[in-house]
Image: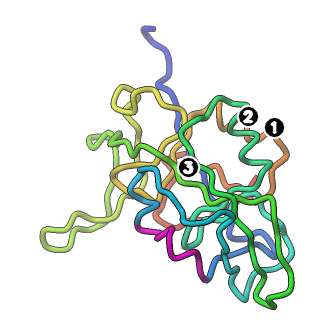
Amino acid sequence: MAGSDPPRFYLLEQDLYLHGTWGVSDGPEELDPVDLLAGIALTPAAVPVDVELSESSGDARPDIVLSLLPLFSARLRQALEQAGVDNVQYVEARLRHPEGHAIESGYFVANVLGRVRAVDLGRSRFGPASGDIEGDLLDFTIDPSASRYLRFFPLDESPILIVIDEPLKLALESAGLVGLELLPTTAWTGIPGQGGI
């Protein structure tokens, strides 16, 4: 449509400033964090998998944890599925608090499938290069045609980043979730967890 605004995209992140939020200190051997960044389906040896929370984890019960490996709550999973997101492999997880006696259920290791190369290089900014190594991705714009109009995908140029479209952002905001940060890609500074919803 001529004259219409281009679609806006956002990053799905963990709000690291949420009081009592969680981090992960150790995950299951069969789900290597590097493999999770590949965007391909994985087969754990046993389910549920055990995930150890970091010592600094408090009592916030966030709906998303993005340290070491991605954890989504059952509430976040439901919100994504209701919005039509179907490119996530969910592996049931059993979260252990550092004390060892408290166990949390209702969480999943979220393996987001299908990395997409969709950064509009001409309208995006990178940090300083180091020799032949390109600088870190900073504020950036998504090319909607390169994204194949997907609503939820890991970014090939920086696989730790999960990109969502604006309708999905609105759906997640209305779901009453805790500890999510939904940042416009054009405001990304390379530092995660800068706010929250």
Disc assigned to residue 171: 2
Query: How far apart are the two marked residues, 1 and 2, measured between alpha carbons?
Result: 5 Å
Position of 53 relative to 75 (above/below): below
Residue farthest along the top direction in this orientation: 1
Which numbered tag is attached to residue 11?
3
Q: Position of residue 42 (x, y in %)?
A: 47, 56
Three-letter amino acid code at the position of disc 3: Leu
Name the residue that disc number 1 marks.
174
Q: What stretch is highlighted in magenta?
A: 26-34
Q: Which amino acid does label 2 sit on?
A: Ala
Nearer to me, 156 or 142:
156
Residue 51 left/right relative to 69: right
Disc on the earlier residue, 2 or 3: 3
| N-term-proximal mark, 1 vs 3 | 3
Q: Which residue is drawn at 54% across and 73% down?
A: 68
Q: Taking 96 as reference, is 4 left or right? A: left
Q: Is residue 11 magenta?
A: no
Q: Nearer the viewer, residue 189 or 71?
A: 71
Q: What amino acid type is highlighted by mark number 1?
A: Ser
Instruction: Say what secondary structure mark 2 lies in.
Output: helix
Q: Which residue lies furthest to the left in this view?
A: 132
